[in-house]
Image (cartoon, grey):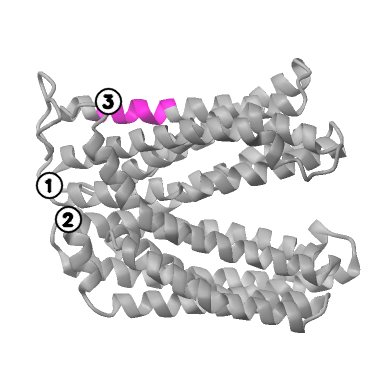
Amino acid sequence: MDDTREPARDPQPEPEAPRSTGGAPVTSLRGRALDRQILSLAVPALGALVAQPLFVLADSAMVGHLGSGELAGLALASTILTTVVGAFVFLAYATTAATARRVGAGDRRGGVAAGIDGVWLALLLGLLSAAVLIVIAPWVVAAAPAEVSPHAEDYLRYSAPGLPGMLVVLAATGTLRGLLDTRTPFVVAVAGAITNVALNALFIYGLDMGVAGSGLGTAITETAMGVCLALVLWRKSRTLGVSLRPRGSGIWGSAIAGVPLLIRTLTLRAAVMLTVVVATSLGTVTLAGHQVVNAMWGLSALALDALAIAAQALVGQSLGAGDRGHVRAVLRRGLQWGVTAGVLIGLLFAATGWWLAPIFTTDPDVRLAAAVGLAVIGACMPVAGYVFVLDGVLIGAGDGPYLARAGVATLVAYVPLALLVWFLVDDGVAGLAWLWLSFGGGFMLARAVTLGVRIRGDRWMVTGASR
């Protein structure tokens, strides 16, 4: 517990141990009860994860009616913004682990205090990122065609003010996950998606603001979501007697804890970007097919990431409570769910790839390449399920430094595979198949090995418990 935070006048009694939604201590759950606990966290988390991409989808649907230049500008600007937000996803992961471990140790006040430190860090990073992006927007989009760059610049400048709110959403969501609450972020995400559609319609068509209106609507929505989740934390802080005042030491501590997770995230982003570069170099058919396969991979990743989120929270609380047996139980059940989900998703892709591809393209060559690519990732999905859950377990354990080192190692292992595809394979079906075999097979297998080696011993649990 942090003595520098001032208690409220009438704080409510603090719970002595983390509790599940059914009232039993989290660390006492086994078997089917643990399965229900995992799903009770994963299903709302999946809903929140799915709701976020609806922002870009809604923007695209509305802006697309304005013209091809406007739609291309939105595509460029939204890619830049998604990259920026993705780089800061460590805000959610770090606050989940920090909050969960403190709550597991019976220090609910300390858990909420750690989350508040993360929210202040998110706000500062968001303000800085928004200011920088607004200033450099013309240079960022300067290489785009003349009919595209003005629209991309407009979207960036009008949507950038929403970055502080979006990063606060990440940190606050992580805090609530650490408290085993994934429903509140889900409700806020769904409400945000609906609000975004309404505001975009008003600004784009009602006020005739075009692409700028789409950016403004998104910025307002993201800010409102951040405020809503911040208010939820404010209520919890008042109940527990936790001060909301920013603490330099707490914010700095959150930043230091987040650096390894930032490195991990950047290595993943680098691998994805390298895959796109290679696909681009191989030609039109490979690149077009890659877009289809990548979209389906991203959709499946949301389902697997939801299981990872559940593992983060449960492992964090179990380590905080000092119950390594329960940590192992969560690990086993989580891996069973992850691999099973990977098998089912893989079979679905392999069986329906030929019928899924025409949804995205009418070109027969691209359709064949995409169908083969979907079969390839289908075969890789069980490994992906294993990797996602292990990643969540180690994040929940606070094992960020190892994840950073493992991320660098797996990126180094993947680069030669990607370059071999680049130089030895031509455009077409073979190009896409080999590219996704190198990523979905080689890169994910390298991650499976590095993470699997780590969880064989107990050192990662000692690391997590000491943080």
Precedes in sequence: disc 2 or disc 3:
3
For residue 240, say whether it is visible.
Answer: yes
**463 on left or right of 402:** left
Image location (x, y in percent) of residue 75: 73, 44
- Give the alpha-carbon distance from disc 2 to disc 3, as whole Å: 24 Å
Precedes in sequence: disc 3 or disc 1:
1
* Disc 1 target residue: 106
Image location (x, y in percent) of residue 126: 47, 34
> Looking at the picture, does residue 43 appear above or below residue 77?
below
**209 on left or right of 128:** right
- Figure quadrant of the N terminus: top left
Image location (x, y in percent) of residue 335: 38, 71
- Give the alpha-carbon distance from disc 3 to disc 1, as whole Å: 19 Å
Which residue is painted at 41% across and 32% down in the image? Answer: 123
Labelled pair 2, 1 in contact (Cβ < 8 Å): yes
Image location (x, y in percent) of residue 447: 46, 74
* Disc 3 target residue: 235
> Looking at the picture, does residue 414 appear above or below residue 215?
below
Kind of residue indicated by mark 1: Gly
- Give the alpha-carbon distance from disc 2 to disc 1, as whole Å: 8 Å
* Disc 2 target residue: 320
Which residue is painted at 36% across and 29% down in the image? Answer: 230
The count of marks equals 3
Magenta region's main secondary structure? Answer: helix
Name the residue at the top extreme: 207
- Figure quadrant of the C terminus: bottom left
Q: Which mark is residue 269?
A: none
Instruction: Give the secondary structure at mark 3.
Output: helix
- For the record, the magenta segment spans 227-236
Which residue is painted at 39% across and 56% down in the image? Answer: 261
The picture quadrant where one finds residue 374 is: bottom right
